[in-house]
Amino acid sequence: MVALYNLLESIRGFIELGGDVLWAIMVVLLAMWTLIIERYWFLLRVYPKERRRAIDEWEARDDHRSWHAHRIKEELVSGVRQKLQRNVTMIQTLIAICPLLGLLGTVTGMVAVFDVMAFFGTGNARAMAAGVSKATIPTMAGMVAALSGVYFASHLDRKAQVESEKLEDMLQND
């Protein structure tokens, strides 16, 4: 319990040091990782059932060679492809938003530094340091948040492409 309290205190101190923009980065990061985890859940638990349903539906057909049958096959593959790619674009968008929020934090922190300089001149180093930390910490947090999802987003995108191509090949062989 003490360790959890200490962890929450250090997070609170970090957010105070970096400013309010860190709350927005944290919300975007939470949404991004929720979607990433959901996509992996889909790939591991739901997709195999969807693939089996599409294969069973295709195999239940008597006609596999007509123009109409090919359109049905395309519809089956397209439906599964849509389900595979759901939320991947949203994850990529959230990844792109994180550094922009960090940049917003940089700008607001620099504004704080300029306010201190306008009021005190360059003589109050402590107040200027607070503004500089509000300028650099959100930048770092935004970049780290974005980097934490880049690999997984590209892996999910590639996995969706590969799995939909495999499904198309499975239905083609009949």
Image (spheres, rainbow, N blue to C red):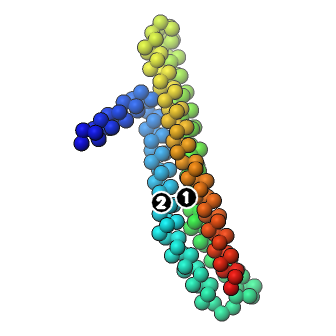
- Few, some or many residues within 10 Å of mark 2 (<14, 14–19, 20+): few
* Secondary structure state at the residue bearing disc 2: helix
Where in the figure is residue 151, as x and y percent of width and height? 58, 50
Q: Determine whether, in the image, residue 32 is placed left or right of residue 158.
A: left
Give the answer, above or below, for where 163 lies relative to 96: below
Q: Which residue is mark 1?
A: 87
Q: CA separation, marks 2 and 1?
A: 9 Å
Q: Is residue 94 visible?
A: no
For the N terminus, give its image quadrant: top left
Q: Earlier in the sequence, mark 2 or mark 1?
A: 2
Residue toward you, 20 or 66? 66
* Count of numbered marks: 2
Q: Which residue is mark 2?
A: 38
Pointers 2 and 1 in contact (C-beta within 8 Å) = yes
Residue under the point 48% across and 45% down: 29
* Secondary structure state at the residue bearing disc 1: loop
Residue 67, image quadrant = bottom right
Where in the figure is residue 126, as x and y percent of width and height? 43, 14
Where in the figure is residue 142, as x and y percent of width and height? 53, 37
Residue furthest bottom in the image? 62
Residue under the point 63% across and 59% down: 158
- Few, some or many residues within 10 Å of mark 1 (<14, 14–19, 20+): some
Give the answer, above or below, for where 170 lies relative to 159: below
Residue under the point 28% across and 39% down: 3
Residue toward you, 67 or 6? 6
For the C terminus, give its image quadrant: bottom right
Residue under the point 58% across and 53% down: 153
The amino acid sitting under disc 1 is: Asn
The amino acid sitting under disc 2 is: Glu
* Res 174 label: none
Give the answer, above or below, for where 144 lies relative to 171: above
